[in-house]
Image (spheres, coloured by chain):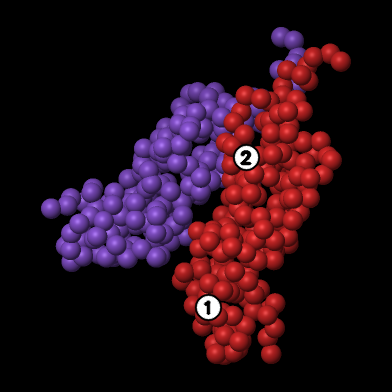
Chain colours: A red, B purple
Amino acid sequence: MANLEEIIAAAAKVFRTKGYHAATVQDIADAVGILKGSLYHHFKSKEDLLYLIVKEPIARIYATMADIVASESPPAEKLRRAILAHLEAFDQHYPHLFVALRERDEMKRRFREQFKLSPTQYERCWQQIVREGIKSGDFRPDLDVHVVSYGLLGMLNWLHTWYDPRGRLSVREIADQFSALALAGLARGPRRTRPG
Amino acid sequence: MANLEEIIAAAAKVFRTKGYHAATVQDIADAVGILKGSLYHHFKSKEDLLYLIVKEPIARIYATMADIVASESPPAEKLRRAILAHLEAFDQHYPHLFVALRERDEMKRRFREQFKLSPTQYERCWQQIVREGIKSGDFRPDLDVHVVSYGLLGMLNWLHTWYDPRGRLSVREIADQFSALALAGLARGPRRTRPG
């Protein structure tokens, strides 16, 4: 008797390796080791299952991000925490969130309907952090808030094409590298060299 | 009478808006305005057509990148040129390269077979630029070459989720922003502030 969590974990792996479109419900039944008919007690369609896979990890990272943005930390610290939280979620929910990224188009409508925070609002959290940093004088004012935010998200989300949970570096190490790169890139340079 | 170029352009648009998996050959025939049967004079299958769409733009950006890497420019200049070339290719071949990015898994095997330069070798070009910059002392030595290279590629490739050719900023402006961010992020800081 497989429970829903086992089914979700198996389906995430199948979607990750075969791709959502190529994978069949039969593939998932085989991976779980139960009959296809029994799977339909747990979900109605492949699309339903995709939603079940991404639902919780997405809800969690959205909630974490809302907390970070609302916190009292200085902007550079918020950015560092956001980068780490985003990458740690990839790792904790591997490969669920990579399936979500790969199938974003598929999920867009459903995301909008089901979550309080939409992908657009998630992007706005990053924009807000960058904007706060510019306002506080920590980040350089010459860069476009939208381009920078999309750049950062791209840097992070691209992990779905190369990250290996058994790879040489942990997500924490990767997050440190990206934070170092992003914070130096955003730093308001001249300020540092002035006395006082 | 539609020629191959018109068919490729129409198919790229259909794949971009509908997604490769959801799009049918009938959709493409409708977009071109010819009978489905006539389309099969030009290609054998939907996969064939996907390959035709991405073939030339990919071959060109690979060739440009090989030139940039082999050139005598200093590493920072190479990086700036690489960022601009990568983004200009997105724009010149819109939406062909975005279809390629979205369907990378689909194309991987075929890429390997048909191009002299594989996606992995393209990634190595970026790694080489970063490595040269570290060696020359222009880029900071504390960051991992692979993580930085993937970070840069992610920053650029993520455009496929947000870039609008009729948008507020041109690719050149976006490239300038990303270059400024990347070069400041990679710059070997202390050097700048030392006299001489």
Q: Residue A73 falls in which quadrant of the image?
A: top right
The chain letter for the residue carrying disc 2 is A
Q: Are marks 1 and 2 on the same chain?
A: yes
Could you tell whether A97 is left or right of B161 in the image?
right
Image coords of residue A99 (percent x, y): 58, 63
Measured in 3D between alpha carbons, the distance from the residue under mark 1 to the one under mark 2, in whole angstroms, is: 35 Å
Q: Amino acid at mark 1?
A: Ser
Q: Are marks 1 and 2 in contact (CB under 8 Å)?
A: no
Q: Nearer the viewer, residue B26 or A21?
A: B26
Q: Residue at x 57, y 32 (%)?
A: B178
Q: Nearer the viewer, residue A107 or A89?
A: A107
Label 1: how many residues lie within 10 Å, few (<14), some (14-19) or many (20+)? Answer: few
The chain letter for the residue carrying disc 1 is A
Q: Residue at x 55, y 90 (%)?
A: A37
Name above or below for residue B161 compared with residue A104: above
Give the residue furthest to the left.
Answer: B1
Residue with the mark numbered 2: A149
Q: Residue at x 78, y 20 (%)?
A: A192
Q: Secondary structure at mark 1?
A: loop
Q: Amino acid at mark 2?
A: Ser
Residue with the mark numbered 1: A45
Image coords of residue B146 (percent x, y): 62, 44
Q: Going from the N terminus, do you reach mark 1 or mark 2 first?
A: 1
Give the residue furthest to the right.
Answer: A196
Q: Is residue B34 visible?
A: yes
Q: Nearer the viewer, residue A68 or A91?
A: A68
Label 2: how many residues lie within 10 Å, few (<14), some (14-19) or many (20+)? Answer: many
Q: Is residue B157 visible?
A: no
Name above or below for residue A46 compared with residue A81: below
Quadrant for the C terminus of chain B, please: top right
